[in-house]
Amino acid sequence: TQLLEQSPQFLSIQEGENLTVYCNSSSVFSSLQWYRQEPGEGPVLLVTVVTGGEVKKLKRLTFQFGDARKDSSLHITAAQPGDTGLYLCAGAEGSTLGRLYFGRGTQLTVWP
Amino acid sequence: GAGVSQSPSNKVTEKGKDVELRCDPISGHTALYWYRQRLGQGLEFLIYFQGNSAPDKSGLPSDRFSAERTGESVSTLTIQRTQQEDSAVYLCASSLVRGGLNTDTQYFGPGTRLTVL
């Protein structure tokens, strides 16, 4: 059973389009992280959100943490081929250091 | 090197054999994690080490899996009597514990791809 459900599982779009990836759960998380993973490499942290309703921007990427801290979204504006990769969300239940619960990821392909 | 390193990068073994996977964390990182990533799946937590505390083994799928860590450095993940369902990429991550919070960044290695024939 996945604690975090990501959608869509696959996304294939043209360069310049906008997209949103969702990460949902019935559980409350103290923090939620978004990672990007490329083939043959480990995931790389993009952002951590902690406060319910928090919005963080990283260039063309906008991350939002739901008010109830059960869900999150990642919005990419004007996608580029370099954005291609597997996007993973991961949640922490407690505030102290420990395990993360990962979603299955969204495989994004941006065509030139 | 500056990052987390793992070895071997690829391992092919026969069903029933034991395997050892190695992780070298970033120097000074006291927290170390092992995850498993099956094809098309997210990361599945296996075990977590933090300093001298007892490791959190709650993610180990069976008693065939074990892990050790030498002080605050190298860790080895051992899988005994491997099964075909153990085939996956095994990822290691380390973290510099600042406030001891779950917001501390985990830095991942490139993983070891294990194939059990």
Image (spheres, coloured by chain):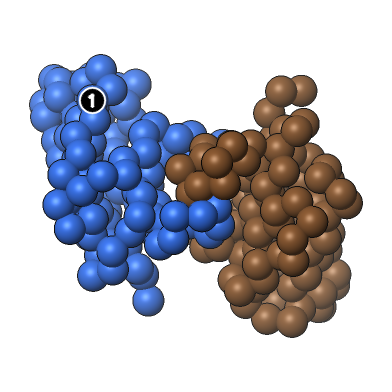
Chain colours: A blue, B brown
Identity of the residue drawn at 44% across and 55% down: A95
Q: Which residue is labeled 1 in the image? A: A57
Q: Is residue A80 above or below residue B109?
A: above
Q: Is residue B67 above or below residue A41?
A: below
What residue type is disc 1 on? Lys
Pick out the residue farthest to the front. B99
User: Residue A48 occupies which quadrant of the picture?
Assistant: top left
Identity of the residue drawn at 77% across and 46% down: B23
- Residue A20 in view of the camera: yes
Q: In the rendered view of the protein, which quadrant contains the N terminus of chain A? A: bottom left
User: Residue A69 occupies which quadrant of the picture?
Assistant: bottom left
* B86 with respect to A93 (left or right): right
Identity of the residue drawn at 62% across and 41% down: B97
* Chain of the residue under label 1: A
Q: In this view, does B94 lie above or below B40?
A: above
- Residue A14 in view of the camera: no
Residue B81 coordinates in the image, percent (x, y)? 81, 78
* The one of A94 and B39 positioned closer to us in this rendering: A94
Residue A28 coordinates in the image, percent (x, y)? 28, 64
Secondary structure, mark 1, is strand
Pick out the residue farthest to the right. B70
* The one of A8 and A76 positioned closer to us in this rendering: A76
Please rate how many residues cluster around mark 1, counting C-alpha atoms within 10 Å: few if below 14, some from 14 to 19, many from 20: few
